[in-house]
């Protein structure tokens, strides 16, 4: 019951947040006609959320996680309302203030994600957490199927400022439901922390990295994840450009590709939630990574046919869930409950921290290839897919997948 109450509120909030991202992006582009400003709006909150993750993880391990979830939702609601008010002024010259508030929302979002992740084992105590990880992925992915369409419709009908106000309300609803959810949290204060001076409260921000880094298998797995996210970031601008400028492409094709990818995430998460306990983790991880690289990168780069693009993106997204859910379960089971927040914060920084940088580098690479050179961009995407297959090969050759999926697996 606690799980349904907590994550039900988050699902509502995720749906409107996805719609808000689209609406705000459309407002910025209409107001400034600047691709750079559009990129900043899309990347800023995500980047700050990632880079703040280690400190957010420490906070999640030191303070009551339920209160942090409630507080972070309230803060996010207030920030959405403030941005909505700024948009009513219709002053593009105040974009810097909108970006500043988005940056603050990235901090709150990082804290919320760390507290939610660290609370999973407090609420759901299954021995095998693969199904639970799949269920959470389903909750997170399902809103993305309709959020882009909903955001565009609400923007056209009500305006971006109204969408932000609605989003603020959903954050407050999520905060209220989190407050009503009842579960017994694990102790978040260790004996050695009781006598710690308050000014040293956050000195453990690097502890999660040290815990993660001292084990060879998990260190190698994390490096592979970071490289994979880097190649994914490099591909993002190229994929959008290819689908838009190809003679068979256009905005409608890009929209279908994004909707298909969101549907694939939801279907994959639902499958893992239903059958996750039966999965062979090693086969699921290796197979998911390999098929995702072939269908969502190599196929898309080589074939100039919109249905193949949409199908490839959908299959890739589905396979991502068959990779991510077992990996998340492995990390949850391997990490001491007292260190859940800081380890997952470190994982997010080390694994996803390369992505925002790669997005910018990928845009520069596509510009150097030539935005109208669809053949060159296609080869660029194919090369990135081959790189992803190489990551699977290296980790498999080093025995990393075998080690982390063995029973008992290495402990952190």
Image: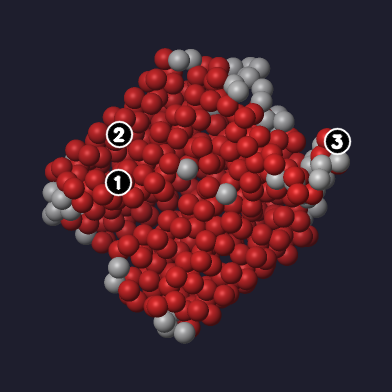
**Residue 374: where, in percent of width, then height?**
15, 48
Residue in front for this viewpoint, 328 or 224: 224
Q: Name the residue that disc number 3 marks.
A: 191
Q: Name the residue that disc number 2 marks.
A: 385
- Residue 341, quarter of picture: top right
Cα separation, mark 1 vs mark 3, equals 47 Å
Q: Residue at x 63, y 19 (%)?
A: 410
Cα separation, mark 1 vs mark 2, equals 14 Å
Q: Could you tell me which quadrant the C terminus lies in? A: top right
- Vertical arrangement, residue 22 with respect to residue 404, above or below: below
Q: Are the residues tagged 2 and 3 within 8 Å (C-beta)?
A: no
Asked if one can make out residue 118 in the rendered structure from this viewpoint, the answer is: no
Circle number at residue 173:
none
Q: In the drawing, does residue 192 fall left or right of residue 362? A: right
Q: Residue at x 29, y 56 (%)?
A: 254
Q: In the drawing, does residue 407 fall left or right of residue 152? A: right
Q: How is the image coloured?
A: secondary structure
Residue in front for this viewpoint, 95 or 343: 95
- Vertical arrangement, residue 315 with respect to residue 4, above or below: above
**Residue 33: where, in percent of width, then height?**
29, 72
Q: Name the residue that disc number 1 marks.
A: 362
Q: Secondary structure at mark 2?
A: helix
- Local packing at callout 2 (Cα closer than 10 Å; few below 14, some 14-19, many 20+) is many
Q: Secondary structure at mark 1?
A: helix
- Vertical arrangement, residue 45 with respect to residue 362, above or below: below
* Between discs 1 and 3, the one toward the N terminus: 3
């Amino acid at each position: 019951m606690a799980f349904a109450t907590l994550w039900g509120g988050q699902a509502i909030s995720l749906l409107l947040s996805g719609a808000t991202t689209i609406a705000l992006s459309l407002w910025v582009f209409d107001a400034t006609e600047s691709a750079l400003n559009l990129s900043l709006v899309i990347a800023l909150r995500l980047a700050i959320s990632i880079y703040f993750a280690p400190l957010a993880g420490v906070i999640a391990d030191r303070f009551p996680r339920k209160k942090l979830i409630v507080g972070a939702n309230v803060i996010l609601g207030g920030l959405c309302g403030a941005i909505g008010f700024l948009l009513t002024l219709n002053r593009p010259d105040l974009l810097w203030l909108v970006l500043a508030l988005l940056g603050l929302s990235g901090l709150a979002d990082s804290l919320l994600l760390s507290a939610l992740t660290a609370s999973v084992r407090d609420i759901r105590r299954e021995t095998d957490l693969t199904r639970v990880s799949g269920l959470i992925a389903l909750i997170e992915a399902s809103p993305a199927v309709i959020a882009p369409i909903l955001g565009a419709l609400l923007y056209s009908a009500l305006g971006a400022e109204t969408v932000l106000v609605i989003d603020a309300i959903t954050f407050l609803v999520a905060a209220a439901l989190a407050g009503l959810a009842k579960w017994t949290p694990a102790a978040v204060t260790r004996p050695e922390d009781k006598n710690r001076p308050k000014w040293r409260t956050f000195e453990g921000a690097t502890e999660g990295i040290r815990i993660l880094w001292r084990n060879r298998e998990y260190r190698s797995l994390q490096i592979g994840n970071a490289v994979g996210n880097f190649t994914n970031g490099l591909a993002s601008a190229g994929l959008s450009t290819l689908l838009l400028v190809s003679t068979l492409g256009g905005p409608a094709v890009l929209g279908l590709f994004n909707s298909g990818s969101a549907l694939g995430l939801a279907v994959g998460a639902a499958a893992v939630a239903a059958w996750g306990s039966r999965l062979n983790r090693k086969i699921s991880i290796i197979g998911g990574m390999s098929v995702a690289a072939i269908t969502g990168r190599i196929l898309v780069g080589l074939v100039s046919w919109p249905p193949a693009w949409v199908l490839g993106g959908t299959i890739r997204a589905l396979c991502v869930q068959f990779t991510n859910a077992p990996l998340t379960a492995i990390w949850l089971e391997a990490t001491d409950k007292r260190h859940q927040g800081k380890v997952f914060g470190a994982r997010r920084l080390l694994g996803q921290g390369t992505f925002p940088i790669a997005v910018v580098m990928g845009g520069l690479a596509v510009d150097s290839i030539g935005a109208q050179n669809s053949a060159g961009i296609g080869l660029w995407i194919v090369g990135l897919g081959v790189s992803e297959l190489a990551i699977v090969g290296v980790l498999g050759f080093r025995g990393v997948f075998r080690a982390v999926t063995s029973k008992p697996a290495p402990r952190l």
